[in-house]
Amino acid sequence: MCHTLGTVSSKQGIPSRSENYSEWYNELVVRAGMAEHSSVAGCMVIKPHGYALWENMQRALDDMFKATGHVNAYFPMFVPKSFLAKEAEHVEGFAKECAVVTHYRLKLDPAAGGLIVDPEAKLEEELILRPTSETVIWNTYSRWIQSYRDLPLLINQWANIVRWEMRPRLFLRTREFLWQEGHTAHATYEEAEEEAARIHEVYRRFAEDWMAVPVVKGRKTEVEKFAGADHTYTIEALTQDLRAIQAGTSHHLGQNFAKAFDVTFQTQEGRLEYVYATSWGVSTRLIGTLVMAHSDDKGLVLPPRLAPIQIVIVPIGRDDASKQATLQAAERLAASLGEARYDGRPLRITVDKRTKESPGFKFNDWELKGACLRIELGPRDLESGSVVVARRDTFEKETVPTEDLAEALPAELAEMQSRLLRKALAFREANTHRVDRWEEFAERFAGEGGGGFVLAHWDGTPETEKEIAERTKATIRCIPLEPLHPDDEKPGACILTGRPSPRRVLFAKAY
RNA sequence: CGGGAUGUGGCUCAGCUUGGUAGAGCGCUGCGUUCGGGACGCAGAGGUCGGAGGUUCAAAUCCUCUCAUCCCGACCA
């Protein structure tokens, strides 16, 4: 690509990752048709291609939630201000980014014309657009739970959320986003702990088995935990620009919300006790995570299990007659693959029927949009009874007899799915470092960009954690639950203070 | 909320310094030639230049006010 174009995208390409990672990401998301900035400040429009990806994620996650005993429900998006005030830490965490509804009516301005908020229509109590639903849900649960027989209560909600972010970024940080939030109630601390861990593992499985994104399972420090939680579990992924991205969290809320909303139950022995709670969520940020994990300078690379379009058939013709013939052949081929299955489901196949664009344009276009496999079907193939199959992740092309496709395509998709995970895992391993000297630590996080995952010793105090963050912008992403290497759990000396440390923790610059 | 910038066809922008009544590229429509790695020609459609007020014979251009957005900081799934 022409260098004089700098970071401005040319008509054809997107900026390269090495040139400007963050522009690469933004351009890619927009150009691939995933999402765009809306005219509504700080909000995005999720376009059909992006939404289809979200729907595939939803389906997979929802199946896992159902399989672990959860049911879906829906709660109001308005949170009365007084609800939010009930859990002290929780308010403190979210108050700074709340959108507030103060009135319920508009009227025509008799003076200036146009609409104004009707001052007569002020709400008695302001309503907050939910930044998360713990308060509304626990207010409800207080009426639903009386007996140990009502427990456990295992509910999930698919919803939109509003957090008034100052620096929006498509999928990573927008003022409104989509997510799922689970809210469960349990009789004992241990049972809630099991639930939080169970979901934590569901999230890991989803990230690795579906997204092909390896994650570190760990526990958040006191500084980084959810506002209002007893403790928080997280899965942390590494992006191609060597930053950490939090991909999902599962919180053990202890009895904090039960006490704030007076949710008690009678035990089998007749005692009155507060229930224990968990909450957990993943959001459309997972789409951003997916893009950051696998995509390249040509466009999206999507794991076959989640890709909205797994296979695209591009008919190629020289003249009207051969165009017509290959288009018909393409449609016959798509229909003939109707019985084929990958991952237990029909293949998601698209025939590119566009007549105006050239084959070369289409190849690039589908690479941009992240179709996993591309089938080229031209006059030569019609004669030979075969097609050319091109892999999105490796750019390998091979000629495959048409009758073999029903078997070859699912096999190719499966191979791609597992290769993406292997590749991402190798990338993470190559960019995970064990550091014992402060100079080396600071050097690794100096300047712009990430610095990868760094496993280092920490004395366990919030003061040290904050000091390190101020000096290097690196934060403790988590205390890993399972060591990446056995030696990580051996004691050592804090990277900053030199004081004793029981084990290494995971540092990184985060999104 | 502090610092910086920008508002001109659907999109990206030029024009503004030195006022003279609006341009380009992309996209869109039609026709023709192309077509196995990002094609091209010709002909079209489309803008009261963010809004209000002012200066002037004349304002996209100068002045005042206003609205909005973007970028850099504090926050963040």
Image (cartoon, rainbow, N blue to C red):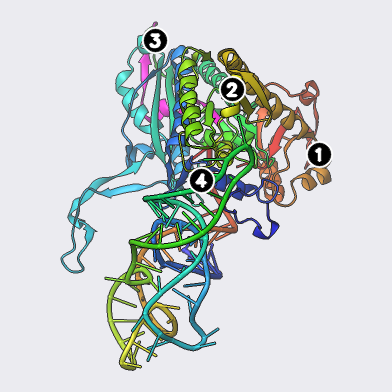
Q: Earlier in the sequence, mark 3 or mark 2?
A: 3
Q: Are marks 4 and 3 on the same chain?
A: yes
Q: Earlier in the sequence, mark 3 or mark 1?
A: 3
**Residue identified by numbered label 3:** A267
Q: CA distance from mark 2 to mark 1?
A: 73 Å
Confirm whether residue A300 shows in the render. yes
Q: Amino acid at mark 3?
A: Thr
Nearer the observer, B9 or A487:
B9
Q: Which residues are magenta?
A: A248-268
Q: Amino acid at mark 2?
A: Glu
Q: Position of residue A5 (x, y in %)?
A: 65, 58
**Residue identified by numbered label 4:** A30
Q: What is the secondary structure assignment of the residue under circle 4?
A: helix
The reply to whether discs 3 and 2 touch (Cβ–Cβ < 8 Å) is: no
Pointer 3 local density, CA inside 10 Å: few below 14, some 14–19, many at least 20 = some
| Residue A265 part of the magenta-drawn span | yes
The label on residue A210 is: none
Q: Are marks 2 and 4 on the same chain?
A: yes
Nearer the observer, A416 or A179:
A416
**Residue identified by numbered label 1:** A498
Q: What is the secondary structure assignment of the residue under circle 2?
A: helix
Q: Position of residue A205 (x, y in %)?
A: 58, 20
Quarter of the view holding residue A463: top right
Q: CA distance from mark 3 to mark 2?
A: 76 Å
**Residue identified by numbered label 2:** A383
